[in-house]
Image (cartoon, helix red, strand yellow):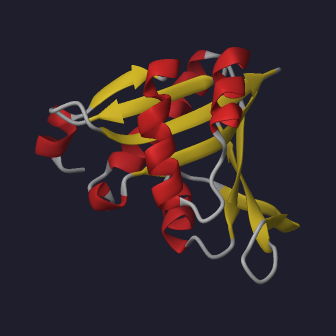
Amino acid sequence: MNALAQTLWRLAPMHDAHLAQVMELEQLIYPFPWTEGIFRDCLKAGYASWVVHDGPGALRGYALMTMAVGEAHVLNLAVDPQYRRQGLGRYLLLHLLQQARDAHCTLVLLEVRRSNKSAIRLYQGAGFRQIGTRRNYYPGHAQREDAFVLALDLD
């Protein structure tokens, strides 16, 4: 991880005030972005929701996760394309995993697009393994895309 970059990153709980910047990134990154309403519902439900700002305060990434009954589920982890390959995705993921451990979760699950090779590498590098496939899980332009279901045992 780029130590200089990490010293500039500021991790904070996501709030409604962040949603305009979150939506800008969401629409930039994903061909089928979440709506602002989905993010608002996640915040209202009390999901673990985090943003990362750089030194000047621009939002560079965010992550959301649910936790219940000893299990965590990573819902969304996104990094500004200009800030990828600097360790920011790993920084966010490791923070979520620590949150899951602190909440006494023993299992973390997530879905990832079959075509998202960089995200798959990130998750596998953190110890996730594929436990299944959800057929036609993600929307696509020509057809729906499968998701790999990944799991990490925290025990």
Report x, y in % for residue 29.
49, 59
Name which residue lies at 60% across and 44% down: 76
Spot occupied by residue 86 in the image (x, y as percentages of width and height): 26, 55
* Residue at the extreme left: 4
Q: Quadrant of the C terminus?
A: top right
Q: Point out the residue furthest to the right here.
A: 135
Q: Can I make out residue 95 in this image?
A: no
For residue 16, above or below residue 107:
above
Nearest the camera: 107 or 24? 24
**Residue in the image at 46% along x and 58% along y:** 28
Residue sitting at x 79%, y 21%: 68
Picture layout, residue 52 above or below residue 109:
above
The quarter holding residue 33 reads: bottom right
Q: Quadrant of residue 51?
A: top left
Residue 148 visible in the displayed image = yes
Q: Position of residue 19 (x, y in %)?
A: 50, 30
Indicate left or right for 61 with 41 as reference. Answer: left
**Residue 4 percent location from the top left of the image:** 11, 43
- Number of labels in the image equals 0
In this rendering, would 95 be left or right of 123? left
Residue 29 falls left or right of residue 40 = left
Q: Residue furthest bottom?
A: 142
Q: Quadrant of residue 128?
A: bottom right
